[in-house]
């Protein structure tokens, strides 16, 4: 028989007291786990937004109503001439390069011998939006440059069929497909032109779901808007490209267009979320301190009630170190118990809170969460037991014997 | 000094400082305990009986005089050395059995091995042998609450004998037992003493128990009086 067997038996015997003593730790660990899981789910959601849109720039014709119609930037009657694209690209590239260098980045000039172009050229995906009627329903058609569009909308997935690639083809957003009842292979009449539906996109939770897509040149021809586009999606091909610099440069330099970036907004949201998370974790830390203090009081009280037991151990030859170890083992076991129960409770709380706080989020199991929960609980438990154990070990054998 | 001398008290005294006064718990006590001694100490409450047991067991240190165990002075030893003495040379039996309720009878007998400095070998066979000697083998794996008062006291005696101590100190070992069980326990202690050697000191209020001892002492206001010849 070893000392930890004695500790284990004692813990087992004092089930109610153990549960009561560990309850503070259970609550603190549950709060810690729930906060971390929810925070990570929230951060992932924001990072997803940043990844999708954060490194992109949207360029509209400069008009005060560019985003008023259905939120698509459609119907303003303003267009950007396609011929302005090279100038826009030049301003954009120059701003990105100088911004990158200003932040200490290294730019390899294109074509340098043996070098690699660290800054990949951005993808410019022009779109022309027009309103039309398809099968007696009001519809928005977007003319796109397929190659650039698929790079820009890298998250697009086809539900059925394929992506549009030929001038006589169209592709439907998921909601558009359901509403109009168009099927793969159907001919769609647009302004007297018959186009073949070759694919339906999977839902993207964006305005794209309500549109139908054709090749840019075809849409320009159908609506008599040759050489004109409604907007340009610019996708920077690096995670840390200073898109904000390009936005400022375009708005200052190119007359007739207005560039907007969601990066700053997403980053601000990211910062707010991180700060709120830190504050919550601060409260959790405070709850750990309170749990430690409560446990300290309870263990100290328990030791006064266990004087006879301590006396017996002393009389049987227990050293101070052995008594300290006995109480520490009990603390570790209580911590282990508190950590496991607290983790399960925290996971359950997070599973309930996360989808409510961040719609569409699912809580995922990560191996280090239970490890962290158990370590935090054991540390708290040991800290709370340290002084009471020291106190118990210092009780003189004669005093303890008198208690028998 | 006789070669079978186990403990020797030479002019031992013990004083306590309370808030108001100095209490002389033991005054100039002289006692020699030899191999096979069976000593009973009687006296009213507060007369110093338990204090004397504490001194004999290395639980407390005397304020004056000399205390020798097997010829070696132990009143000057440090806590660590006294610990080793308590672990291996002294056995304790208490008024209430003082068993850990979370452990079985055999685990309680094995409890002292948990505190041994060197890694204890498997003492289970020895513990079973002792439980057999005290007559409760069939209760070896029962929890404490499943034992009667007499059975619990037998476990306590088996625990005290695990290390084959030179001296067994029993503080009112029959205090909470009925007449029949009390007689059984005392008979058991006497039988074990006769078979395994060593010495036993019993503190008791029970004149009948004391009368069975080879030597009897009376504690009165801190003084140890030889009462062997007093009837």
Image: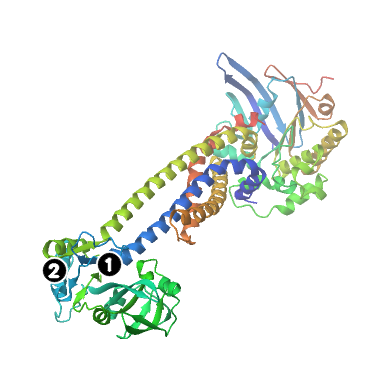
A255 horizontally vs B92: left or right:
left
Q: Position of residue A105 (x, y in %)?
A: 18, 66
A218 horizontally vs B29: left or right:
left
Q: Using the rendered view, name the quadrant where residue B59 is placed.
A: top right
Q: Secondary structure at mark 2?
A: helix
Q: Position of residue A177 (x, y in %)?
A: 42, 75
Residue lying at 65% horizontally and 54% vertically, measured from the top left: B121
Residue B1 shows in this picture: no
Nearer to us in this view, A375 or A85:
A85
Q: Using the rendered view, name the quadrant where residue A204 is placed.
A: bottom left
Chain name for mark 1: A
Q: Position of residue B26 (x, y in %)?
A: 64, 21
User: Total label count?
Assistant: 2
Residue lying at 51% horizontally and 54% vertically, measured from the top left: A352
Q: Tell if the residue under mark 2 belongs to the same chain as the one under mark 1.
A: yes
Label 1 Cα neighbours within 10 Å, binned few <14 / some 14-19 / many ≥20 = many
The answer to whether residue A160 is above or below residue B173 is below
Foreground label between 2 and 1: 1
| Label annotation for residue A91 | 2
Q: Secondary structure at mark 1?
A: loop
Q: Which residue is mark 1?
A: A74
The answer to whether residue A176 is above or below residue B202 is below
Residue B95 shows in this picture: yes
């Amino acid at each position: 028989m070893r000392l930890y067997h004695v500790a284990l038996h004692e813990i087992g015997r004092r089930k109610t007291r153990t549960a009561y003593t560990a309850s503070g730790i259970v609550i603190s660990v549950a709060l810690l786990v729930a906060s971390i899981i929810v925070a990570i789910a929230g951060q992932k959601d924001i990072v997803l937004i940043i990844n999708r849109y954060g490194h992109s720039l949207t360029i509209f014709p400069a008009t005060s109503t560019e985003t008023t119609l259905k939120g698509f930037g459609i119907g303003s009657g303003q267009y950007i001439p396609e011929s302005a694209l090279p100038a826009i690209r030049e301003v954009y590239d120059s701003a990105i390069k100088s911004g990158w260098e200003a932040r200490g980045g290294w730019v390899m000039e294109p074509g340098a011998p043996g070098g690699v172009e660290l800054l990949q050229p951005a993808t410019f995906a022009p779109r022309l939006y027009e309103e039309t009627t398809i099968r007696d329903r009001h519809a928005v058609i977007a003319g796109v440059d397929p190659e650039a569009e698929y790079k820009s909308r890298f998250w697009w997935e086809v539900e059925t069929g394929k992506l549009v690639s030929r001038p006589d083809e169209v592709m439907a957003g998921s909601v558009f497909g359901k509403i109009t009842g168009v099927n793969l292979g159907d001919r769609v009449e647009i302004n007297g032109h018959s186009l073949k539906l070759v694919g339906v996109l999977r839902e993207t939770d964006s305005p794209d779901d309500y549109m139908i897509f054709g090749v840019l040149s075809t849409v320009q021809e159908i609506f008599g808007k040759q050489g004109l586009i409604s907007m340009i999606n610019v996708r920077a091909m690096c995670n840390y490209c200073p898109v904000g610099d390009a936005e400022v440069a375009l708005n200052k330099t190119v007359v007739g267009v207005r560039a907007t970036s969601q990066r700053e907004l997403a980053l601000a949201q990211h910062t707010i979320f991180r700060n709120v998370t830190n504050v919550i974790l601060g409260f959790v830390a405070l709850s750990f301190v309170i749990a430690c203090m409560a446990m300290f009081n309870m263990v100290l009280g328990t030791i006064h009630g266990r004087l006879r037991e301590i006396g017996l151990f002393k009389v049987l030859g227990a050293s101070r170190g052995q008594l300290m170890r006995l109480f520490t083992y009990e603390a570790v076991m209580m911590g282990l118990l508190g950590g496991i129960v607290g983790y399960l409770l925290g996971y359950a709380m997070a599973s309930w809170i996360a989808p409510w706080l961040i719609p569409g989020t699912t809580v995922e199991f990560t191996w280090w969460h239970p490890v962290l929960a158990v370590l935090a609980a054991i540390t708290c438990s040991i800290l709370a037991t340290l002084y009471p154990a020291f106190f118990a070990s210092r009780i003189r054998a004669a005093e303890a014997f008198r208690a028998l | 000094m006789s070669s079978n001398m186990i403990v020797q008290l030479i002019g031992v005294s013990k004083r306590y400082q309370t808030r108001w006064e100095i209490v002389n718990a033991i005054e100039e006590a002289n006692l020699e305990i030899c191999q096979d001694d069976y000593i009973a100490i009687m006296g009213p409450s507060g007369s110093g009986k338990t204090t004397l047991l504490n001194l004999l067991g290395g639980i407390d240190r005397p304020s004056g005089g000399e205390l020798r165990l097997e010829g070696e002075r132990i009143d000057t030893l440090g806590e660590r050395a006294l610990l080793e003495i308590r672990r291996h040379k002294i056995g304790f039996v208490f008024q209430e059995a003082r068993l850990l309720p979370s452990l079985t009878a055999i685990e309680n007998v094995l409890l002292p091995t948990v505190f041994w400095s060197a890694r204890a070998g498997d003492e289970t066979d020895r513990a079973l042998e002792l439980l057999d000697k005290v007559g409760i083998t069939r209760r070896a794996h029962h929890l404490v609450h499943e034992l009667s008062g007499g059975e619990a006291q037998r476990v306590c005696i088996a625990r005290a004998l695990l290390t084959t101590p030179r001296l067994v100190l029993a503080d009112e070992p029959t205090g909470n037992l009925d007449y029949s069980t009390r007689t059984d326990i005392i008979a058991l202690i006497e039988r074990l003493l006769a078979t395994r050697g060593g010495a036993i000191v019993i503190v008791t209020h029970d004149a009948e128990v004391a009368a069975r001892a080879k030597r009897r002492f009376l504690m009165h206001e801190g003084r140890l009086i030889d009462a062997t010849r007093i009837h």
